[in-house]
Image (tube, rainbow, N blue to C red):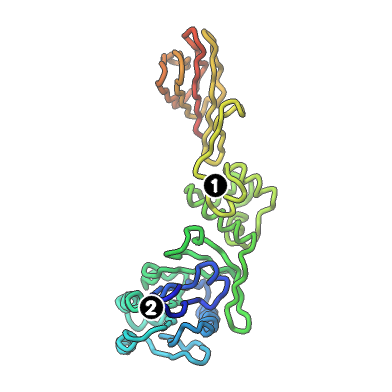
Amino acid sequence: MRREDGGSAALFGIPQLDQLLHGLFWGENVFWAVDANDDARARFAEGVLQCIARVPAFARRIVVGASWAAPDGFEHYPAGPGLDGLLTELKSAAGVVLAVNVPAIVREDDQRVVAQLGHFALEHGVVTHWFGAASDQASGVQTLAQCVIEARAGHLRIERADGRRSQVRGAMLPYRLVSGALTVDATSAASLLGRGLRSVRRQRGWTQAHLAELIEVSPSAISQAERGRHALSLETVLDLSDKLGMSVDHLLRGQPPSYDLARSGASPYLVDSDALGLRTAVIRIPPRGSAAPIFRPDKAQVLLIAVGLIQVVLPSARPILRQGDALTVHQAGVTSCRNLGDDEAIVFWHERS
């Protein structure tokens, strides 16, 4: 992203991230949620610092509250009361990037200082990288950050990226530390699938076990696939896309189509979706004729009368419905539907599992 005054672009210094997120906004707070122990988290932060050092737009590079091994040109400031003086100094500075060790800030100060730093960054155009544990909620950094990137199991996952395309959220990218620097690789097919699975599952409010049952695999297989560790077989992906009622392309992008159009006569059912638990048929009943039930009697059913006068035969009742009426059958099922008129009747017969 470019400065409003026409200055240089603020970047991660990591080509794949800069391409995906179009760099950084000046004043953006980036929270790196690193699922690792303190030593591994320090090595990860040092890898990011190596990348930051490559960005020419940064005139000052400052590490706060950490003794990380930073490249030449980085200044170090301890966490504590002395930060007030640093912030006063930076009010008139341009091209500043901070790298903050979240545990040190929380240990030495409190959430007030975290909020102070985050708001200062936004107000004065200071790019701030926060490094903490993925499970850390107490600091409040995840709430104030405009960009949240989770690092776990060799993959980066974009949890939040304000100001970018919605498709960016959930993207997973493999990463490595090469000669101390963070190297991010292009998204793999397994990562794309994992992102799509997680997105679709959450949109529908399903658990991993629910999705696993749908395609007859183990919940562990779904968990591994969502993390991008192991891809599902092509046959399983095709089966899943069919049962979800969406193309493989929509599945990989995690975006189900906004609508599906079905035309009567194309199949026995107008709607047939295991994923949504919906099944609807269009029943045409000849004059004075009848239609047998087509759904399981133990499922709730709804009958919508499009045309005609219909008597619905139930085990304990025989209600008569006119055009525009609807009947919900909660249990015991329908014995038959009778057309009481002299013209063809049309019934939309619906089952929800």
Residue 210 marker: 1
196 and 54: which is toward the camera? 54
Q: Which amino acid, by three-letter code, is at mark 1?
A: His
Determine the secondary structure under disc 1.
helix
Decide which of tag 1 and tag 2 comes sooner along the chain.
2
Q: Write the residue at 55% across / 76% down.
A: 14
Circle 2 SS class: loop
Picture coordinates of residue 114, whole percent (x, y): 34, 77
| Disc 1: CA contacts within 10 A as few (<14), some (14-19) or many (>=20) | some
Residue 172 rendering spot, x and y as whole percentages: 56, 64
Mark number displayed over residue 261: none
Res 39 visible:
no
- Separation of residues labelled 1 and 2 (CA atoms): 52 Å
Q: Amino acid at mark 2?
A: Asp
| Residue at left offset 38%, top offset 75% | 4
Q: Which mark is residue 5?
A: 2
